[in-house]
Image (tube, grey):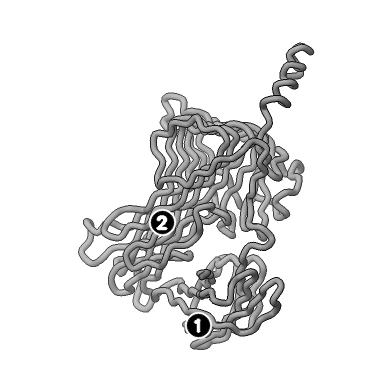
Amino acid sequence: MKNYTWLMTIIFTVLHYNGLAAITIPGADGSDGILHITSSTSIDLSQAVPGNWDDDNSANAGSGIYDSNKWAVVFKYSSVTIDTPVFPVSENTLTFNNHPSRAPVVWLVSGDVAINGTVNLNGQNYRTAPALAEPGPGGFRGGMGYYASSVGASAGFGPGGGKTEVSNRGFGASHASAVTSSPVPYGNPSLVPLLGGSGGGGASSAHGGGAGGGAILIACSGTLTINGKIMANGGTPYDLAYQSNGDSGGGSGGGIRLIAETMTGGGTIEAKAGVAGSYPGSLGRIRVERVNNNNSWTAIAPEPSVVGLTTNDTIVLWPTATSPTVKILTIGGEAVGSDPLASFGTAGADVSLAQTNSVQVLIETAYVEQASEVKVRLTPRSNADYTEITASVNSIVSTDPLVIQWAADIPVDDGYSAMQVHVIRP
């Protein structure tokens, strides 16, 4: 408004205070500047600066902040615009290269967001062994297909990773729901915390499973316009129609959380399963939170969880200080770092153990009832299905707050494996 008349400035000010109060997005200080995408672009999340999510990022504007405690790459833009493709170009797509942690993407925007092109967080389709399909940011990798003698297929990765029949086929991954031969659903409709989809299981045909769709939170204090697309779909498996001996599993859909004062537009929002052959993945989750709803989105799948907001609401972005937490403390007596990457050797192992057939895993929970089920999942990089063991109470560390340590003995074999722990509360 600086170039307008003094009178117009006064009118704007009166309207702003009398009628244009907005929701409050914590941390939305605009320190990453303006994001304006005019042609197909990829943002390299590995360039994010380590720090606290609400730090001022002006010195590294546009790079984002990686907060390992929140497991998120956070950008604090003043506005976001993804232009409509201009003929003869058919697409204007924003994609992402994963951070080494594969953390999800968070946009905290102090102004408006207009998506007229495409934001793509899809998981990769199946890969031929020994490669693994890479997820969208916030998702999990697909399992490996058969590679060589004694290097057979593996299950998909992530809390809902699809099973593998090492000598036959892989199965789809779960997320918002369970699918054939896959684990129970995980996460919650609020998408707090923010999670993507899991990977499908690999097959004996050398074809791996599809990767999980990624996860993104877009929160803006102004208007969110979607006339283009936001996609966080699971990767597709190998199609049974083209082979005779089994096929791989599809990745599950990711997570999309949208928050704004006003939502408008007629675009498409997807967190769908990777579908091909006989073993698709599960749908992901979509969450919509807004004060004013003027949208006419042409397609949204799955059906979103919708929450009405009130102007002047302060948005909850992260789990609260008293939310349930779970973490692995030690594996075979070796301490686990605060930010394990499960890189399978690319950046070194998170924990290295002497050859053994079994290890004890020590887990700690806070604000989790003793009647809960604490489950440890081990997924080898190759040649085996996942193993899931229910842990037992090892000790009560404190009662206020309730902190419990749990222990589980997990069978292991040589080579790399990924380990995860999750809690099912009563």
The quarter of the picture where residue 2 lies is top right
Indicate the amino acid at tag 1. Ile
Whole-percent x, y for residue 370 in the image = 58, 77
Indicate the amino acid at tag 2. Ser
Check disc 2 and report its element: helix, strand or loop.
Answer: loop
Task: Check disc 2: other Cα within 10 Å, few if <14, some if 14-19, many if 20+.
Answer: many
Quadrant (top left/top right/bottom left/bottom right) for the N terminus: top right
Instruction: Give above or below for 326 relative to 259.
Output: below
Instruction: Give above or below for 68 relative to 411.
Output: above
Q: Residue at x 48, y 75 (%)?
A: 378
The quarter of the picture where residue 75 lies is top right
User: In the drawing, what numbered circle is on residue 130?
Assistant: none
Q: Residue at x 29, y 74 (%)?
A: 167
Which of 54 and 416 lies nearest the eye of the viewer? Answer: 54
Residue behind mark 2 = 252
Q: Residue at x 45, y 37 (%)?
A: 229
